[in-house]
Amino acid sequence: MTDPLLTIRDLRIEGRQGRSWTPIVKGVDLELKRGEILGLIGESGAGKSTLGLAAMGYARDGTRISGGSIDFDGQDLMALSERRRRGLRGRRIAYVAQSAVANFNPAHRLIRQFSEAPTEIHRIRDRDEAEAEGRALYARMRLPNPGEIGFRYPHQVSGGQLQRAMTAMAMSCRPDLIIFDEPTTALDVTTQIEVLAAIRDAVREFGTSAIYITHDLAVVAQMADRIKILRHGMEVEEQPTRAMLAAPREDYSKSLWAVRSHEAAARPAPAEGETPVLRLSKVSAEYVRGTRVLHDVSFDIPRGRTVAVVGESGSGKSTTARVLTGLLPLSTGRVELDGAPLPDRLAGRSKDQLRQIQMIYQMADTALNPKQTIREIIGRPLRFYLGLRGAAQEARIRELLDAIELDPDSYIDRLPGALSGGQKQRIGIARALAAEPRLIVCDEVTSALDQLVADGILRLLRRLQEERGLSYMFITHDLATVRAIADHVVVMQNGEVVEQGPRDEMFAPPHHPYTETLLASVPQMDADWLDTALARRGEN
Amino acid sequence: MTLTDIKTAPPTAWFGIVVIALYILVALFAPLIAPFGETEIVGMEFEPWGGAYPLGTDNLGRDVVSRLIWGTRNSLGIALATTALAFGAGATLGLLAAVTGGWVDQILSRLVDMLIAIPALLFALLLLSIYGTGIVNLVIVIAVIEATRVFRLARAVAMDVVVMDYVEAARLRGEGRGWLMRREILPNAAAPLIAEFGLRFCFVFLAISALSFLGLGIQPPTADLGSMVRDNAALITFGDITPLLPAAAIALLTVSINFVVDWVLHRASGLKD
Amino acid sequence: MHPLLRMTMQRLALGLLTLFAISLFIFLAIELLPGDLTEEILGQSATPETVAAFRRELGLDQPAHLRYLDWLGGALMGDFGTSLANGREIGELLAARFGNTLFLAAYAAAISVPLALSLGLLAALYRGSWFDRFVNVATLSSISFPEYFVAYILLLFLSVKWGLFPSIADFGSGADLGTMLYRTFLPALTLVLVVTAHMMRMTRAAIINLLAQPYIEMARLKGASPARVILRHALPNALSPIINVVALNLAYLITGVVIVEVVFVFPGLGQLMVDSVAKRDIPVVQAACLIFAGIYILLNLAADLLAIATNPRLMHRK
């Protein structure tokens, strides 16, 4: 049993761009022993998913495996016929995808999808056997009501449970190898920890080999025996997990480590009695009459400071932003801008009030009009609010581009499509700055970005804040981001503020029970974290 | 759509582009090309092909070649005007409904739902029977029918754009409805709308010629491809294909437009992936 | 109330409301006529007596809302009044023709629906192949052709040149099914050619639209064959658009046959309608419109309900 299960040599994969092919994976080697778990780490575009799929002899439409060899248990996958490869997929090599909601077929019941591979496709079990096995695996994955849950359709099951059901489905034929492709990325942290534990236990129990793909170092530290770091389709380095955590060798790896511990310097609290830029007092709101989504939310955003609003999906943090930008009228309570009441509807606000509050979005892709050049995007608020045009406008646009560290000459005439994700986000910042606001609402502005790029954005925001005395309301689900930027933290759950206070107080005990759960669920860069966290949960 | 895009077009699209260009030339220069006048009676009825009248004469003794050229010009011009009218109204209201939402959207959408629930040909027949046949009535009736279809598409396309954060950003900035429609939404909805223009033109062209074929569209003596089929239909039973020529002329143009639209849509969806 | 039942009732109510709105529209269209209908129809030279008689006959001497209620009430009982052109009962006039039109539509549907769906699935399965490309060009052309072009080509070859089928699709009364099918083969074939292309393209597009879905890739990664991916994983999710396009084409088969009926001199409702429009026999046109609109709405309603029934999200609530 010492011979490797999977050996990949000098693998090259290309993707089609228009009429030509550009390399995605540029000669990667990989070896996996039976029962071993290999973590694949990398930023977006590193080629990790493509590599994971190639381990199944599969290339997505628009990509092709152009060189190298993939040897699975003595068979060269590249040399096999497509029919033979299909015979291996699902039966001996299985796949668990990022979004379980999107990867379950909405038209069929879970148990039917579970038993499809063993009964209908590979014909290694009969239906009763497969379904009994399904119930057993659902129980093992700690799904509630395992005898019954299989008869539900995907839309009737929550995201965390679906993710576990998908892992169970991958195990339906007892494969030798499972590819996990970011299986917990789409989940809230408190759900993620449960799914991680369920996956790890099941994989250990059956001695299944696995390739675990993620961009989150702390997550892979809990799951993998070895970690391989990829960048731009090439290997950066590979080490056993503990060695990698303790001492990454390459500069790129070290920079990934450094980003995680980035923390902004604490600033003195605002002076007693100073009027905050924005004050929410007992704000409630509802989308549908009678069902409140916000309950008595109150907090201040002081001048020149950052207030982070933290919570999981459905906590009401984005709704709070919609209320203060005027998109959602409030039902009760009041919002004050600089001590003066702010009309709750967008249409009731003056141009100057609109100018004071600007917004930066999570998805920079959809936040910039793809048909407008950078000049038009930044120039419009200059003209609209400040009446700048012609040479004055041009000069200010260039000034703003300088401020966000993009070279005016090469960027001013580009369309957003010709920018990277981080650059688009910078343009979003410039557009907000152009209005010369007092407050900028940042809605998960770094969560769609890679860690290094996100870190650059956070540093830029911090610098602009100090130079211009801006206030930020920073909506995020990520506690590392909070640590890196916030002065003040507001924790929300189910539309209510459960706790708030200065950042350093919030990260130190005692905590509100929900804050405690939230903090305890964030994976740490410690291979033993999951065990410790689970043990601690068991005690409570 | 740049020159290089056209160079990489598949043969069907190339074929389409060339044919469309030819039709436009014929329509523009009909007075120069046509050997005889539009309504000029030049010989006996149903003269055979060849000689002075390469495709013979029609049921009144008019030169078929000339009638085809004039008919192309008339059919094309009327269909184009109708489509433009339908598009102006339908697209404007569709964008307006998407941007404004609320009761404006509700009223417009329900009205369109109701009009669409009446099959197009029936709708046309009903209105033409009441208001009488004639080019102006024809153009208005068909334009109203097609505008409902354009409205639906324009609204749907605009709805996809309205939910984008950049539109929200413009709203939050305090921009008015006009800016949202013209500057934020229209440029991003243009590609499907242009393709739709091609398709709608085909429908209009076919609908008008169908009505003319039934004798309810463009009235004699104006030359028009649909009514030319009707006028000479009797020849078919003698195995003479002359009446098929105007029908083929219609088919050739609509096929060509569809080829080009198919390519444009395919390209647009390919770029999205 | 059960949500499913409520949804069904909602659709039903909406259908009725639409039908009511259309009836109002059909009726009001005449009211909007500039000047008087009688003058329009009888011409300027009509004597006052004829005009008065004509007005009485049409009920034009009564206020509009009474006439509307009268007309709608009559229509509900199957009484559409009398024809202006020949004074016959419109209900009777329509009944026989309507049966013929339904027969022709059913004939064409029985061939085209299964044909279109299987061709659509095959084209989706072998997308990009020569078969797919050929079908694409062929159906695109067929959609673009005027119906009378298709009809005359078939007539020219199958009837005039080779004499296989009759060019006039009149089977009289009392003909047996075989004779009816034979005599109406050409119009049915024309309709099949026209609607199959549209349904087939939409079926293919509905399936192909789904192929980028992650659950399709998941099926492939479970080892499913291409045919299984299409039939078991894509098709069930594409049912709603496919049902809709089938309903749309069935409605077209009933309401859009006008031209085919004219070419083949088929005694159907469409033919009657064209004649009535030419003669400006407005009560007949109104009646035919109302019946057609009713069928159209009924078919759409059926499609809606079928789409609900095949959607697990609606059938099995959270």
Image: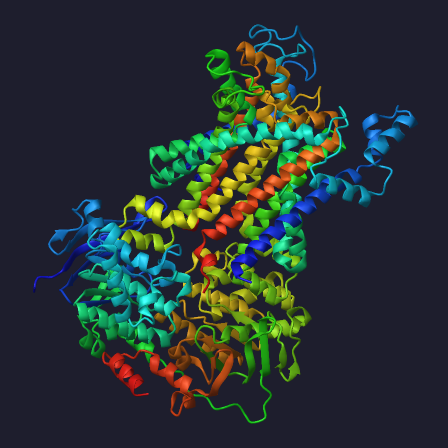
Residue A223, by quadrant, is bottom left
Instruction: Give C183 or C195, whichever is nearer the viewer.
Output: C183
Task: Please determine whether, in this image, residue B149 is positioned above or below residue A529.
Answer: above
Q: Is residue A255 visible?
A: no
* Image coords of residue C142 (percent x, y): 48, 29
Residue at (59% x, 47% y) in the render:
B152
Question: In this rendering, does residue C181 appear at all?
Answer: yes
Where is residue C318, by image quadrant?
bottom left
Residue at the (69%, 47%) spot, across then down: C21
Q: Looking at the picture, tell me which residue is in the foreground, A180 or C51.
A: C51
* Quadrant of res B34: top right
User: In the rendered view, does C152 fall on the left or right side of A260?
Assistant: right
Residue positioned 64% across, 54% down in the render: B97
Q: Position of residue B175 (x, y in %)?
A: 63, 63
Vertical relation: B144 (above or below) B227 = below
In percent of width and height, residue B17 lies at: 50, 32
On the image, the x and y values in percent for residue A34 come to 13, 64
A37 or C260: nearer the eye?
A: C260
Taking the view exactly as shown, the residue that stands out farthest to the right is: C48
Along the horizontal axis of the image, is B29 left or right of B161? right
With C318 as the anchor, is C57 left or right in this view? right
* Lateral position of residue A246 relative to residue A427, left or right: left
> How is the rendered protein coloured?
rainbow
Please tell me which residue is depicted at 48% across the width and 68% down the height of the picture: A402
Q: How many marks?
A: 0
Q: Is residue A479 above or below residue C23?
A: below
